[in-house]
Image: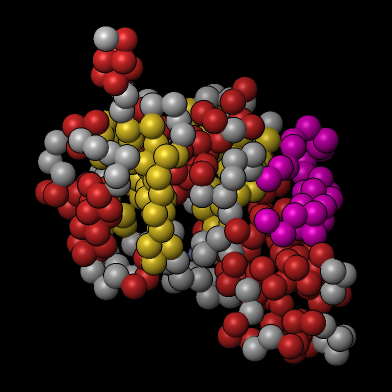
Amino acid sequence: MNNSNSYRDKYFIAGIDIGGTSTVIGLVDNNNQIVQRKAIHTATYEYAEAFFNEICDIIKNFDQLSDISLLKGIGIGAPNGNYYKGTIEFAANLRWKGVIPVVEIIQQKLPEVPVILTNDANAAAIGEMMYGDAKDKKDFIMITLGTGVGSGIVVNGELVYGHDGFAGEIGHTIYNPNGRLCGCGRKGCLETYTSASGIVKTAVELLIRKSDDSELRNIPIDELTTLHIGNAANRGDKIAIETFDITAEILAVKLADSVAHTSPSAIYIFGGVANAGAVLLEPLTTYFEENLLQIFKNKIQIKTSALPQNDAAILGAAALIKKEL
Ligand SMILES: [Zn+2]
């Protein structure tokens, strides 16, 4: 029968994007389509074991996955994920402290299934490279702006892992040594200014310091999000616009420094904060050009990711397995 061949070729990969707030588990078929997905709240799980056991159950219960033997592997993007060791180590934005042996925990539940793990921003970079705008690019940087600030750095067509698997931590390069306290224990990391909570903090500082009218004043401070600030900025709210202007300048300075290290042809901005659009991207591009070394000026594109939110991270995580097939 003709169908038997296509049935035999059919396979699935689970792509998992672990974030500080939520985690998305996607089932990707052999045509790179996400055929099913489910989100869970990362922070509600007190223990990592319970969290990863739940993920295994979700994968096993995907109705599209009629037979577990069709699952070719599980790819995971996670904060502080270590590609070499299969661990999450000392992630500032996760509840579980220390070293979490992720691959080991999953393989106790699903012993036959290969598991590969990397940093969440690395997974997004691979997603952009395999399915997005970076298909023809050999040198680019992916910056993820969300609960934390991550980065995936591609040089000569290869993701940079470094000697120990931790390369690409632009979010924890220091913008101001006397600045805000970071979740990593140091002061003034880029993440403390350009993560979602960092941007909210900047807005709150402006609301306190300035007397301008702002629609943000109608929202209780502990409920304020980057979505509120983005929407307000797009409606012309002065405080919200200034918040993004300050954020853009700080991000631009650090990105201009990053360019000096790897000379990328493009930088992609990915994650919830990037959805604010031109209110972030326009000042970012202006400050970026201002801060670049002369030899790099007017050569490097700054863009938002071409892949829909969540998809890049899921597809990128799945691509970790696909590369090995
Ligand atoms: Zn830090």
Q: Compared with residue 234, is residue 265 higher up or lower down, i.e. above or below?
A: above
Q: Position of residue 134 (x, y in %)?
A: 61, 30
Residue 186 can be seen in this image: yes
At 26% from the left and 19% from the top, the residue drawn is: 8
User: In the rendered view, would you say 321 is above or below 212?
Assistant: above
Does residue 35 appear left or right of residue 203 in this picture?
A: left
What residue is drawn where x is 66% and y is 55%? 274
Nearer-the-camera pick, 205 or 180: 205
Q: Which residues are magenta?
A: 275-304
Image location (x, y in percent) of residue 210? 83, 87
x and y percentages locating residue 151 in the rendered image: 53, 48
Which residue: 58% across, 72% down? 197
Quadrant location of residue 70? top left
Determine if the magenta segment contains residue 290: yes
Quadrant location of the C terminus in the rendered image: top left
Q: Main secondary structure of the magenta part?
A: helix
Quadrant assignment, res 245: bottom right
Which quadrant of the figure contains the N terminus? top left
Taking 229 as reference, is 176 left or right? left
Q: How many marks?
A: 0
Seen from the viewer's position, the closer of residues 179 and 220 is: 220
Give residue 222's position: percent from left, percent from top. Answer: 58, 85
Relative vertical location of residue 149 with respect to residue 72 in this rendering, above or below: below
